[in-house]
Amino acid sequence: MTIAAARAGKHVICIKPLAINMRQVEEMDRALAESGLRFFYVENVPFIPALEKAQSVIEEGALGEVFRLKACGGIGMPPNKWAFDPEKSGGAIIDMAAHGIAFCRWMAGAEAESVYAQAGTFLHQDKTTNEDTAVIVIRFKNGVIGQCEDSWSLAGAMDSRFEVFGTAGRILIDNLHRQPVQVVSEEGYAYWGGPKASGKGWTYPLPLPGDIIDGQYAMLENFIDCLREGTPSRSEFADGRAIQSIVDAAYHSLESGKSELVEPR
């Protein structure tokens, strides 16, 4: 559909993941390059207010040097039954881990170097051979370690949690079940515009309205503004391509049982 839209002279907004594999991504890339049109990658992670706040805390130096990241995403089953079909989709990695990978890549501030993955089908064995549970470890080129835990096998409510570990502090974010941002800092930071000292120790920035907590509205508004003004978006084709390359490396790791290098960019 992306290729058809580009050939028809239409700008493209494509939800994650870009495609089933990198071969399809490269075909999309060529079609878009030939068209000269804009491509927006629908990944809401860069627009989640709690994560934007976390990024500002990191940029202020409140955590010291970031060295480890963790993202947990889970649901009870995929939203579409066709996702169980191995011919049409991968499993929890391509469906869920794309968000955690986007978070780790953003907070690490670097591209991925290698990926190691473990996965299995535990809850939906009667429906699919696609993985319903996965753990991915990513080593970034600047040395930061990222970990993504993702599933279609989660009992109870949906899971959307993020953690950032630094040499002088850490951040815990539960974007669904409780106060989304919890920060501990030895250095302090500007707590919602207050003095830097107000952000020392454990702090809990104010809750956010539910209609903006997932960043979807801000993401689409950003796309529209970029089309009108011709400015870069925070979620472009290159971001989707980088995330897809990590997803592909994770699947290669499942096959080889070893850590796999991410393709050069």
Image: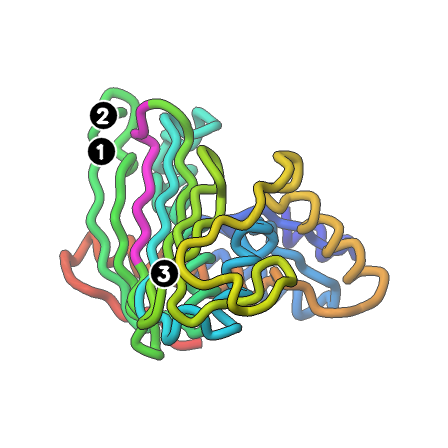
Is there a contact, CB below 8 Å, between mark 2 and mark 1?
yes
Mark 1 / mark 3, whichever is N-terminal: 1
The magenta region covers 147-155
Whole-Å distance between the Cαs marked 2 and 3?
37 Å
Task: Look at the image and say whether residue 251 sits in the magenta stretch.
Answer: no
* Mark 2: secondary structure: loop
Mark 2 / mark 3, whichever is N-terminal: 2
* Mark 3: secondary structure: strand
Vertical relation: 161 (above or below) 143: above
On residue 121, the disc is 1
Whole-Å distance between the Cαs marked 2 and 1?
6 Å
**Residue 40's quadrant in the figure?**
bottom right
**Residue 53's quadrant in the figure?**
bottom right
Query: Which residue is denoted by mark 2 in the rendering?
Result: 125
Query: Which residue is denoted by mark 3 in the rendering?
Result: 170
On residue 239, the disc is none
The x and y percentages for residue 172 are 39, 51
Query: What amino acid is at disc 3?
Result: Arg
